[in-house]
Image: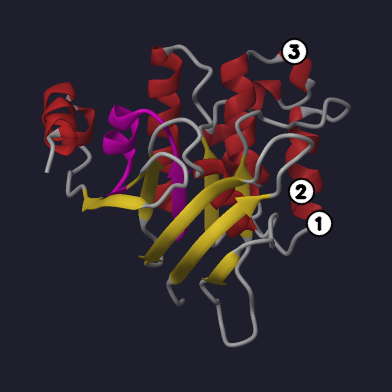
């Protein structure tokens, strides 16, 4: 599979009423290899979500070129997207939220296995309103993987959770990712989270967002659980120059 190629020269939202145009992104040039887990971080309003929407094909009004990682010469990649809110279907059960997506794709994913991995087997017949916020987040992860994505985009999926729950879901995400050949782009404002998860950190400046740091994070799974190691990397990244 080819790499994801991003050459984004600019993204501007038009002015509305008395508000001037908003220049959200500028000069984003990236190559993300197949199977890599990349984290995008930066201050609020720097264009992280806007960049994901461009990569997902939800926004075509930009200046630049996006070359998605082709499966073959004529086959486009399957893209999964985990939004900031879980966006579950409230009239469908946990299991139905997964099977409905599977039926609409060419996926051969095992729904039962994903329910087991996310600890939702005993809740397969429950409706989303009966789930805790953490369980809804787990279901959103399972739904993203049920389509067997070649490219998975995640937009601050754990931001609203307490730290113990978020920590468990980070480990769950890593566990599922290691079982699949999936390229992951994970947006977060939390630098510690980015260090724990990412093989690579891409930091954007304030708007208009552009890349001001692109750093590999060569940590092994044990080091990613060590708070002292993570804090040392955080200090290194935050050092000026």
Is 183 one of the magenta-colored residues? yes
Residue stretch in magenta: 181-202
Q: Mark 1 points at which residue?
A: 104
Label 2 close to label 1 by CB (< 8 Å): yes
Tell me which corner region of the image, top left, top right, bottom left or bottom right, holds residue 79: bottom right
Which residue is painted at 69% across and 35% down in the image? Answer: 19
Circle 3: is it few (<14), some (14-19), or many (20+) Cα within 10 Å? few
Q: Decide: is 132 above or below 139.
A: above
Q: Which of 23 and 170 is in front in this view?
A: 23
Tell me which corner region of the image, top left, top right, bottom left or bottom right, holds residue 130: top right
Residue 74 percent across, percent down from the top left: 64, 85
Q: Which of 104 and 36 is in front in this view?
A: 36
Q: Decide: is 199 above or below 172.
A: below
- Work out how far the residue at label 2 is from the one at label 3, CA to CA, in angstroms: 20 Å
Helix, strand or loop status at disc 1? loop
Circle 1: is it few (<14), some (14-19), or many (20+) Cα within 10 Å? few
Q: Name the residue under label 2.
A: 101
Q: Decide: is 68 above or below 43.
A: below
Which residue is painted at 73% across and 41% down in the image? Answer: 98
Residue 109 percent across, percent down from the top left: 63, 54
Residue 51 percent across, percent down from the top left: 54, 51
- 166 relative position to 213: left or right: right
Is 193 one of the magenta-colored residues? yes
Helix, strand or loop status at disc 2? helix
Q: Earlier in the sequence, mark 2 or mark 3?
A: 2
Q: Name the residue under label 3.
A: 130
């Amino acid at each position: 599979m080819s790499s994801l190629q991003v050459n984004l020269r600019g993204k501007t939202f038009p002015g509305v009423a008395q508000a001037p145009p908003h220049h959200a992104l500028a000069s984003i040039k990236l190559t993300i290899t197949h199977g890599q887990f990349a984290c995008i971080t930066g201050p609020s309003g720097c264009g992280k979500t806007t960049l994901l929407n461009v990569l997902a094909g939800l926004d075509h009004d930009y200046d630049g070129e996006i070359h998605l990682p082709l499966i073959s010469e004529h086959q486009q990649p399957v893209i999964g997207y985990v939004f900031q809110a879980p966006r579950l279907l409230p009239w469908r059960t946990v299991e139905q939220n997964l099977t409905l997506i599977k039926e609409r794709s060419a996926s051969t994913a095992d729904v039962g296995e994903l329910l087991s991995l996310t600890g939702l087997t005993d809740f397969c017949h429950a409706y989303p309103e009966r789930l805790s916020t953490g369980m809804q987040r787990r279901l959103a992860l399972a739904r993203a993987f049920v389509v067997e994505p070649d490219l998975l985009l995640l937009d601050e999926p754990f931001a609203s959770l307490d730290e113990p729950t978020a920590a468990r879901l980070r480990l769950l995400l890593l566990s599922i990712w290691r079982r699949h050949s999936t390229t992951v782009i994970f947006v977060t404002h939390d630098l510690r989270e980015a260090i724990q998860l990412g093989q690579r950190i891409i930091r954007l400046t304030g708007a208009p967002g552009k890349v001001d740091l692109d750093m590999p994070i060569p940590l092994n799974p044990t080091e990613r659980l060590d708070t002292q190691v993570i804090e040392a990397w955080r200090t290194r990244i935050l050092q000026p120059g």
